[in-house]
Image: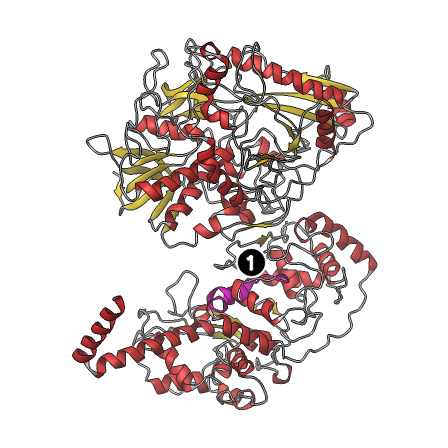
Amino acid sequence: MHKHYVIAAAVVLAGGFGSLALAKETSFETVQKGKYLTQAADCVACHTVENGKPFAGGRAIETPFGTIYSANITPDRETGIGAWSDDEFYRAMHQGIGPDGTRLYPAFPYPYFTKMTREDVLAVRAYLNTIPAVNNRRPDPKLTWPLGYRALMRGWNWVFFQEGTFKQNSEKSAEWNRGAYLVEGPGHCGACHTPKNTLGGDKRSNALEGNQIQHWFAPKLDNDRQNGLGTWSVDEIAEYLKTGRNRHSGATGLMGEVVANSTSKLDDADLHAIAVYLKDVTAVTPEKAIQPEQAQMDAGKAIFADSCAACHQSDGKGVPHMFPPLAANANAQSSDPTSVMRVILEGARTVATDARPTPSSMPAYGWKLSDAEIAAVATYVRNSWGNAANAVTPAQVKSLRGALHATTQ
Amino acid sequence: MARKLPSADVVLVGFGWTGAILGQELTDAGLQVVAIERGSWRDTPTDFAVTFAQDELRYYWRRALFQQPARETLTFRNNATETALPMRRLGSFLPGTGVGGAGIHWNGMTFRFLPSDFIAKSHNTQRYGADAVPADMTIQDWGVTYDELEPYYDKFEYLCGIAGKAGNIKGKIQDGGNPFEGARSRDYPTPPMDMVYGPTLFAAAAKELGHRPFPGPSANMSRAYTNPLGVQLAPCTYCGFCEKYGCGNYSKASAQTTILPVLLRKDNFELRTESEVTKINLDSSGKRAVSVTYVDAQGQEYEQPAELIILCAYQLHNVRLMLLSGIGMPYDSASGVGVVGKNYGYQITSSVDVFFDDKFINPFIGAGSLGMVVDEFNGDNFDHTGLGFIGGGYIAGWNTNGRPIETHRTPQGTPRWGAKWKRAVAENYLKSFSISTHGAVMSHRTNALDLDPTYRDILGRPLMRMTFDFTDNEHRMSDYLTDRAAEIAKAMQPREMKVTKRTGSYSIVPYQTTHNTGGAIMGTDPKSSAINRYLQSWDVPNVFVMGSTAFPQNPGYNPTGTVGALAYWAADAIKTQYMKNPGPLVQA
C-alpha cells in the first residue's frame, strides 16, 4: 500500500520536472559518495580550526619548514572554492596546482589524491558544494626562507611528485585493490606514516615504515610482529579503525582524530579492505636493540610499579579494550620513542566512538616525573615482558618536553 | 531580570546519578532534555587522575568534592525547643556538588531493600500488633513493592556492573549469598571482589555463630565490565580511596563511568554547569510548573521553560526547592499536617574495633565496598517480639581503607593525642579491624525539614532547617545490633576490642553517613505523602522528584541501589504512561 504511494509520487515528479528530477536523483547519489570520500580523506581535520565552522580552513599546520594555514574549501566565492570550475578543482587534487597556476604545498596531500579517479574527485567537489559557504580568509603561511617562494614547488614536484591515477594490480584481489586505493589515495595514510626526506618528500621505498609528525611517532604499518601490525589480525585492524580500539591498542592524539572524523564512518567492507591491504605490506625487521643499562631498568621498574601498574598491570597485559597492554605493544617498541615519551609527559585520551563511547584516559606525568624518571620508565616498558627497543635518554625527554612546552614541577 | 530561554521538553534539576539516568532514558524516548547543575563539570582524567586522586588533605580534610557551606548550608537542631544554628563546616553527612553529585564520592555499597521494608507499616503492625508502631512513629508503606521494583534494581545493577553473589534467584536460595534478600531475576553482573584477610576473619567468626555472611554487593569492579550502554569500567586496584574521593581508574560506578560517555554524545541532550536552580515557577493555578529560574556563575538569571521538570538534586535540596517553590503543603510537625518536609530520616551506626597481636590485616588494601556482611539482624529478618523496637541493620566487616589521616584505630583508653597515641597508632595500624553496624531510622513526627526563619543563603533564600534526633527505637535497635557485632568480634579472638555504641542525642558534627532520606515521601495518599508511587508530585503533576527524598523511612541498608531502581521505575512510568497522556498517573 505504502509502496504504491511512493511510486505514484515519483511518476508525478518525473512528469512535472522531466529530466531535472532525474538529474537531481543522480546528483544526490554523487553528493553522498562525495561525502563518504570526504570523510575517507578526513578533509575536515585540516580544513577546520578547533570548534570552528567545518571546512572553513585556517587551521595551522606545522611542518618542519614553518607553519602554513589550511584553505577554506567551503563554496564561498571570495575566500573559498566556490568560484573554482570542476577542472580547476581536479587540477588542484590531481596535480597540486591552484586555479591561478600557483603550486600548492604538499602539506595538502595531493601526492596521494593524485591517485583518486576524476569521478571520485568530482564527487568530493559535489559534496563540498552543498556545505554552507563561510567567508574566512586564511592567514599567510610562515615558512622559512626560501620556501616562501611557491615557484620552488615546481622543482620539488619534479623530484618528489609522481602524478597518476591509481592502477589496479591484477595479481591481487579486488578487495586488496580497494584497500590499496583507499590507503594510497583518499586515505593518504602515508602522509603521516611514511618517512620523509629532508625536503619533506616521501621516502617511497620506505612506504608506511613510520614517521615522526607533529611530535608524535606515526608507527609502522607493515606486517612486522615487533613494532608493526604483525600481531594484529585483519579483523582487529578493521575493529581499531571502526571503534578506535582493539585488544592491542587505543587511538589517541592525531590518530584519534582520524578515527573520529574518518575511519569510524567508513563501511565495514572498506575497513576490511584497508586491513587486507595493510596486512600485505612487507615486514621490515627492526634493527636489534641495544641492551639497556640495568640501573635504568631498575629505576624504571620501580616507577612502573608505583605509577603505571594499576592500569597497565604488573605483567604489562593491561585491560584489553580499555587500558592498552604494553607487553608486545608495537607503539611502545617503535624505533622512535617520541609517542611513548609524549603520552607519559602529557597523558592521552582514547578517542570515543559510538561503538566504544568510554574515552579511557591516561593522566599526564610531566608535572610529576623528571626527564630521567620518564626516560627510565619508558626504557623499562620498551624492554620488559619480551619487548625490546633502544633505551630512552633523559636528553630525548628534555628535548620533547621543551618542544611540547610541557610544564615541570 | 531573568533572561527567558527557548522551551525544552524536560528540565533536570541537578545532574548526579538520578539526573544521568533520567537524561539517558528520556533522550532515548526522543525528548529534548536540558540538565542544570549548580557545580562544575568533572571527569576521570581531568578531576580524579590517579596522579593526584589519593590526596587525603585535599579531598577528605579540605572537602574538595562536597557541597561548600559558604554557598549553601543548613541549620540544625535536635528538637523544636532549640534554636537551629547554621552548619559552617560539613560533619555528619557530606552532600556532593558538581556533575555526578555525591555518586562521585560514594563507597559503592549497592544493596536492595528487603521486600518487607517497602511495607514497613502494615508488615510490622500485622506481625507484632498495632502497638509495635507508636503514634509518633510516622512510618508508612511506600506504595511500591519490591516485586515491582525488581526489574529496575536489576537494570541499575547491570548499568553499574555490581560485583556480588546472589542469595535468592527466583525464590531459590543460593549458597554464599544473602539468604534474606528478595528474589532476584538473575545473579549479579560480575562476581564478588577478591576477599582480603580482615573480612575473611570476620566471616569465619560469624559463621561459627551460625550466621550466613555474604560478600558486600560492590560498585567497585571485581573485573573489567562493559555495561549495556557500551560504557566500560576497569578492574578495581584496591587502593582504598573510594568514599570522599573520585576514582581515577574507572573502577567505581558513577554517572561518569556508566552513562555520561553515551548521554553527552546525544544531540537532544544539553548540560549546563555552574548554574543553580533557585525556583520552580508555577502558573496561576499553582497546579502546573512552567519553568525553572536559575543563576549562572556570573550571577545572570535565566528562566528555562519546560513541559516536564524533574528534581534530581540531593535529597535536602529537592525538599528545599519544593518548599521555596510552593509545591505541596509544607509539613507542620506540631499538628502533623502537611507533607513537604515530613519524615526526614537518617541512619544509626556503631562499631566494634578488634586488635590483634599476630594478624596482619593490612587495611590499606581496601575498596569502598570490600567486605563481608551479616544480614541476620536487618529489617524483619529476626523476631522482634519483646525487644522493644522494630527495624534493624546489617553488621559488616568492611576493609574500606587504611588512609592515614582518617583511619587509625586505637584501643580503649588510648589518649587522643601525644606520644602514647602515636605509639598506639604505630602498634595497631596494620593489625586492627573494624566491624560496623548500619541501622535503620524509623520516621518520627518531630524529625522534619522546614525553611529556617532566620538564616539565608548567598542568594537571600531561607536555609533548610533540619530538626532531628534519634528516638528510643533507634537506640534500642542499635544497642542490640552492636551487641551482636561484639559477639562476632569476640569470636574473632582478638587481643582486645573496643565497642563504640551510639549514645545520647544525634550529633551532626562527627561523620556518620551521607544517607539522608525523606522530606517529600512517596505513598498512596496525598494527605500523607508528597509524591505518588511514580515519584510524581500529587499537587503539580508535571513535577517528578527523584532520590532518597521519596523514602518514607530509612531502612538498614545503603540507599543508592534503591535510588537507582526508583529512578528507572519513574523513568519507565514517564515513558510508557506520562508521555502518552500527561497528567496525574495516580488519581487521588
Q: Is residue B493 visible to us here?
A: yes
Q: Nearer the viewer, residue B522 or A357?
A: B522
Q: Position of residue B136 (x, y in %)?
A: 42, 11
Disc tally is: 1
User: Which secondary structure dominates the residues rendered in magenta?
Assistant: helix
Is A184 placed left or right of B574 in the picture? right
Q: Amino acid at mark 1?
A: Thr
Mark 1: few/some/many CA within 10 Å (<14, 14-19, 20+): many
Q: In the picture shown, does residue B53 fall above or below A193?
A: above
Q: Position of residue A141 (x, y in %)?
A: 45, 74
Please tell me which residue is depicted at 39% across the width and 78% down the height of the picture. Answer: A124
Is A251 within the magenta? yes
Q: Nearer the viewer, residue B561 or A243?
A: B561
Q: How is the image coloured?
A: secondary structure
Q: In the picture shown, does residue B68 fall above or below B187?
A: above
Is A141 placed left or right of A321 in the picture? left
Is B179 within the magenta? no
**Highlighted range, magenta:** A247-264
Of helix, strand and loop, which one carries label 1? Answer: loop
Q: Position of residue B40 (x, y in %)?
A: 45, 42
Q: Residue furthest front?
A: B172
Q: Position of residue B263 (x, y in %)?
A: 43, 50
Q: Nearer the viewer, residue B549 or B45?
A: B549
Please tell me which residue is depicted at 73% across the width and 76% down the height of the picture. Answer: A285
Q: In the picture shown, does residue B471 fall above or below A163?
A: above
Q: Is residue A98 visible to us here?
A: no
Host chain of mark 1: A
Please tell me which residue is depicted at 43% across the width and 16% down the height of the picture. Answer: B447
Q: Nearer the viewer, residue B212 or A237?
A: B212
The residue carrying mark 1 is A350
Is A373 placed left or right of A141 in the picture? right
